[in-house]
């Protein structure tokens, strides 16, 4: 079973903010695949269903971003996915708004949620899909920037296209594997 985890912060205060990219992609996957994400389990809100012919669970940790690993450890213990069947979705300030990147493994980079996941799971060998949120304007604090919503129509459009492409990338990976998804999102 694939465990697909979108990183974000719980609560209406954080809805649609740049840091909640993972939740937005989960919502897009749920919509596209008719999965209801509304059950509480493993410190997350989850929904089980089928994506690309594979059993999957969509997850939104409710631990706040910097403690995402707490939920993921519980999800891994409950669902027991193969190493390559945990997919983590999150934001990246080092990519332009809406740009999608896939990596089969890697470090946390500057992302505190990923840092916590790697620390608590002891693993870096899981696929991840990042959607760019762009860099903050000069003089802005990064913490303030990631907790804002995209404001311009251009930014909203770029981000929505990124969520859609990221959801498609998950589906391509689940259906056709590593090489196909690399070709789909580029390197």
Image (cartoon, helix red, strand yellow):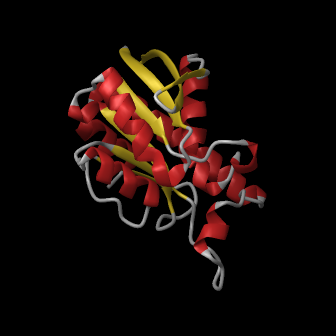
Vertically, is 127 above or below 56?
below
In the image, 178: left or right of 110? left
Vertically, is 71 above or below 174?
below
Vertically, is 179 above or below 153?
above
The quadrant of the rendering that contains the C terminus is bottom left
Report the residue at 50% width, 33% height from top.
Answer: 43
Q: Can residue 169 be seen in this view?
A: no
The quadrant of the rendering that contains the N terminus is top left
- The image position of residue 78, as x and y in percent, is 34, 22
Residue furthest to the bottom = 139
Q: How many marks?
A: 0
Report the residue at 56% width, 17% height from top.
Answer: 35
Report the residue at 48% width, 64% height from top.
Answer: 95
Report the residue at 57% width, 72% height from top.
Answer: 135
In the image, 50: left or right of 23? left
Q: Depth check: 187 or 133 in front?
A: 133
């Amino acid at each position: 079973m694939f465990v697909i985890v979108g990183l974000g912060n719980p609560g209406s205060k954080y809805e649609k903010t740049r840091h909640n990219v993972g939740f937005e992609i989960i919502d897009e996957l749920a919509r596209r695949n008719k999965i209801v994400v509304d059950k509480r389990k493993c410190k997350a809100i989850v929904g089980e269903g089928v994506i690309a012919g594979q059993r999957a669970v969509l997850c939104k940790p409710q631990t706040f971003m910097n403690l995402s690993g707490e939920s993921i450890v519980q999800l891994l213990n409950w669902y027991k996915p193969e190493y390559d069947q945990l997919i983590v979705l999150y934001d990246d300030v080092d990519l332009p708004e809406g740009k999608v990147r896939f990596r089969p493994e890697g470090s946390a980079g500057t992302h505190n949620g990923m840092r916590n996941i790697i620390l608590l799971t002891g693993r870096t060998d899981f696929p991840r899909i990042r959607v760019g949120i762009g860099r903050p304007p000069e003089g802005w604090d990064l913490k303030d920037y990631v907790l804002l919503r995209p404001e311009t129509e251009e930014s909203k459009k770029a981000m929505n296209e990124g969520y859609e492409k990221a959801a498609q990338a998950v589906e391509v990976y689940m259906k056709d594997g590593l090489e196909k998804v690399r070709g789909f999102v580029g390197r």
